Image (cartoon, rainbow, N blue to C red):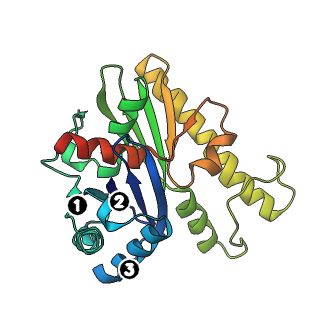
Amino acid sequence: MILAIDAGNTNIVLGCIDGDNKIVFEARLATEHSKTEYQYAVEFKNMLEIAGIEKSQISGAIMSSVVPPLVAVLKKAVQLVAGVLPLVVGPGVKTGLNITLDNPAQLGSDQVVDAVAALYEYNPPIIIFDMGTATTVSVIDRNRNYLGGMIIPGVKISQETLTAKTSQLPKISIEAPRKVIGKNTIDCMKSGVIYGNAAMVDGIVEMIEQELGENTTVIATGGLSSSIIPFCKRDIIIDNTLLIKGLKLVYDKNT
């Protein structure tokens, strides 16, 4: 069984995948820069114990991170818990992905892993929306080339900034109101965050397809995708296991 970890700016995703590429466990915990390797190790150990997974069952580990200061801390935490040193997705790691960016090294490891999994599971051309702290958009053409994409302020970041920069707008939960046209401040804000982001996704897909000149397979992943994507008009696949599956695929390519 392989232990897979993705460290994002808001959450760390922890998962286990067996030899048949079946995800047997997945959980999230908050990303905190101040925690030591021992504090993370305790949290990892507790989560694995709750899932009934023992140290002896873990034969390897892989990790991706968009938080560079946490890489060394999390590597040590994994070693303490699982007794293995994780492979870290980055330069020198085989992914099989042909990245055609001006500087391929600038591509986030989470986007690399998403793309590897998407190409394994779905037919290109592909558009991937990863809706986390930031909303990233990845575009893969029919020849399986990673062309590029977009980086957009995330749903929560946008909403929190709106609240922080205005005097009379309260904090709200990210859930849809009963109607698009809000009749009070709270419903207007909820409508803006849900339907506004859904319309943005639909619009971006339309523009990218016009630029490519063909229809695409559209996939959404990340912690907030399930809140936004159901309100899109486009047919979009929600796959919140994309990162974990991609990490296992990258691990297999390198062992």
User: What is the C-alpha distance between the residues marked 2 and 3?
Assistant: 15 Å
Task: Quadrant for residue 77, please give it.
Answer: bottom left
Judging by the rendered image, the residue that carries numbered circle 1 is 86
Q: Which is nearer the N-term, disc 2 or disc 3?
A: 2
The residue identified by callout 3 is 42
Residue that appears at 41% across and 21% down: 212
Question: Residue 251 appears at what percent x and percent y?
Answer: 24, 47
Q: Residue at x 34, y 76 (%)?
A: 41
Looking at this view, name the residue that lies furthest to the left: 92
Give the Cα separation between the discs numbered 2 and 1: 9 Å
The correct choice, above or below, for 8 with respect to 252 in the image is: below
Q: Nearer the viewer, residue 21 or 234?
A: 21
Front residue of this view, candidates 24 and 140? 24
| Disc with the residue nearer the chain's start (3 vs 1) | 3
Q: Position of residue 133 (x, y in %)?
A: 47, 60
Above or below — where is 11 with respect to 197?
below
Against 47, is 110 above or below?
above
Left/right placement of residue 57 relative to residue 224 reads: left
Q: Secondary structure at mark 1?
A: loop
